[in-house]
Image: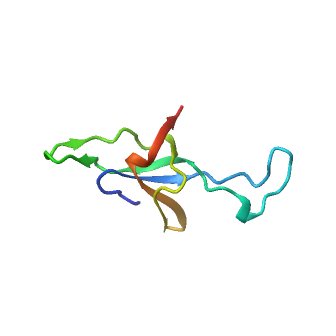
Amino acid sequence: MLKPLGDRVVLKAEEEEEKTVGGIVLASNAKSKPTTGTVVAVGEGRLLDNGQKVEPSVKEGDKVLFDKYAGNEVEYGGEKYLVIHEKDLVAVVD
């Protein structure tokens, strides 16, 4: 499994629906980038200038909202993941 470093978080992004509410099938280029995902792995936290470590505010299994163009897409073990900095997370979804 991927182990993120520092304040990075590994997400499994949720794929966009193929159809609209009215039942229209969207072309792949018309779909927007996903902005929600599930946390798969969390780094050890951000290191401050004074040497203290700030613990991450999310944990594995949390469903989160993130900035639309944040992070890097990676493929590992045949699965696609998104690796982002914790600062690019917008909210935890309950």
Residue 20 place in picture, x, y as percent:
80, 48
In the rendered structure, the answer to whether residue 20 lies left or right of residue 63 reads right
In the rendered structure, the answer to whether residue 67 lies left or right of residue 22 reads left
Q: Residue at x 82, y 57 (%)?
A: 25
In the rendered structure, the answer to whether residue 49 lies left or right of residue 75 reads left
Instruction: Judge whether residue 48 can be spotted in this image.
Output: yes
Q: How many marks?
A: 0
Question: Quick one: quadrant of the C terminus?
Answer: top right
**Relative to 94, residue 79 above or below:** below
What's the coloring here? rainbow
Question: Quick one: quadrant of the N terminus?
Answer: bottom left
Which of the pair 26/80 is nearer the observer?
26
Corner quadrant of residue 57: top left
Which of the pair 49/65 is nearer the observer?
49
Residue 78 place in picture, x, y as percent:
54, 68
Residue 67 place in picture, x, y as percent:
51, 49
The residue most toward the left is: 50
In the rendered structure, the answer to whether residue 84 lies left or right of residue 16 reads left
Corner quadrant of residue 52: top left
Q: Residue at x 79, y 58 (%)?
A: 26
**Relative to 31, residue 76 above or below:** below
Q: Residue at x 73, y 60 (%)?
A: 30
Which of the pair 65/44 is nearer the observer?
65
Residue 91 place in picture, x, y as percent:
48, 38
Q: Residue at x 86, y 49 (%)?
A: 23
